[in-house]
Image (spheres, helix red, strand yellow):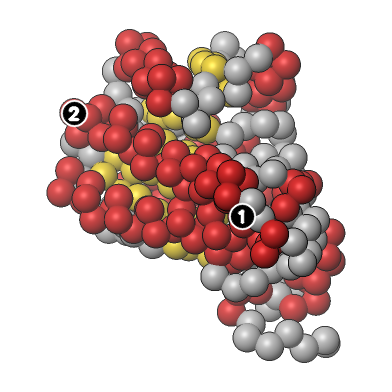
């Protein structure tokens, strides 16, 4: 039997067919899970998400508009989901935002307060906001799992990643504290630190091209990560196969995070 058979959940962050969220949805769908999808408000965003989902072979998908930075929008989404589906087994948090003006090498020190707080709010606090609303629905079914998407720039300085690195550090810490709070309800919370992937979100980072160029030179596997590899890792973490794993940050980056000193080979 497929490992996600009988499970259903919410996926935040399908912007197009290259998004990490799309690869995650593909893996879950392949293994029998039912995916419901958030999209940013607006017809253009809905069409873009619907197009990406249709390519996965998901017919008549459940799509709902939601700005995760709005508590009212989140309330409406989770209420609508609960009316449509009998259970909530997983939530995928694959959203982030930072003003691209401040995602340039050498500009972190100039980041204004508003841009800093906005990045942390949308990229990190939203995981806690989703967990608050998911908790009662998951607890009703005996538990569940949430995952968030991070990157190595949360730990080490990556030129151009700037305030997004700060936000991802907050995301990882948020996941750990949520794991401690929600563990008694059999709700697990983890993050995945994926390697650089050319997506709509990553295009805003001034140093993305250099990241993609340098990773194959330094990573033990000598290549960049593929979206399906992150998708399958998320599938594992959301499934019962990972029932004893919570509060962890799992690297899926072809091993580049293990290298302390970059040496040309």
Residue at the left extreme of this rendering: 184
The part of the image, by quadrant, that contains residue 135 is: top left
* Residue at x-position 15% and y-position 49%: 184
Q: Tell me which residue sits at (73%, 85%) in the image.
A: 262
Residue 117 placement (x, y as % from top left): 53, 47
Residue under the image location 59 percent in, 60 percent down: 165
Ranked by sequence position, the earlier of labels 1 and 2 is 2
**Quarter of the picture holding the N terminus:** top left
The answer to whether residue 45 is above or below residue 30 is above
Instruction: Indicate left or right for 209 with 237 as reference.
Output: right
Q: Which mark is residue 187?
A: none
Q: In front of the other: label 1 or label 2? A: 1
Whether tag 1 and tag 2 are in contact, CB under 8 A, the answer is no
Could you tell me which secondary element the residue under label 2 belongs to? Answer: helix
Instruction: Judge the density around disc 1: few (<14), some (14-19), many (≥20) Cα neighbours within 10 Å.
Output: many
- Which residue corresponds to the image point at 80% horizontal and 76% vertical from the top-left? 217
The answer to whether one can see residue 188 in this image is yes
Where 190 falls versus 134 (above or below)? below
Q: Position of residue 242 (x, y in %)?
A: 35, 54
- Quadrant that contains the C terminus: bottom right
Q: Secondary structure at mark 1?
A: helix
Judging by the rendered image, the residue that carries numbered circle 1 is: 164
Q: Is residue 182 left or right of residue 174?
A: left
Which percent across, then down, holds residue 230? 58, 52
Horizontal arrangement in the rendering, residue 44 relative to residue 189 (left or right): right
The residue where tag 2 is placed is 140
């Amino acid at each position: 039997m497929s490992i996600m058979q009988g499970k259903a959940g919410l996926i935040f962050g399908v912007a197009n067919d290259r998004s990490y969220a799309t690869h995650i949805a593909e893996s879950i769908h392949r293994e029998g899970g039912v995916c419901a999808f958030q999209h940013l408000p607006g017809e253009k965003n809905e069409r873009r998400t619907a197009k990406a989902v249709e390519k996965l072979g998901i017919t008549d998908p459940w799509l709902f508009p939601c700005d995760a930075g709005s508590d009212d929008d989140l309330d409406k989404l989770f209420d609508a989901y609960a009316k449509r589906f009998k259970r909530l087994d997983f939530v995928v948090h694959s959203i982030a935002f930072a003003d691209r003006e401040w995602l340039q090498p050498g500009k972190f020190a100039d980041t204004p307060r508003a841009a800093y707080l906005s990045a942390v709010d949308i990229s990190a606090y939203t995981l806690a906001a989703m967990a608050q609303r998911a908790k009662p629905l998951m607890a009703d079914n005996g538990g569940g799992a949430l995952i968030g998407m991070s990157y190595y720039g949360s730990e080490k300085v990556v030129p151009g990643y700037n305030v997004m690195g700060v936000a991802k550090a907050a995301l990882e810490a948020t996941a750990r504290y949520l794991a401690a709070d929600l563990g008694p309800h059999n709700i697990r919370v983890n993050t995945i630190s994926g390697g650089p992937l050319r997506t709509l979100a990553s295009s805003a980072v001034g140093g993305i091209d250099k990241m993609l160029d340098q990773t194959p030179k330094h990573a033990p596997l000598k290549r960049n990560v593929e979206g399906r590899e992150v998708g399958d890792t998320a599938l594992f973490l959301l499934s019962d196969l990972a029932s004893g794993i919570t509060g962890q940050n799992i690297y899926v980056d072809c091993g580049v995070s293990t290298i302390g000193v970059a040496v040309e080979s």
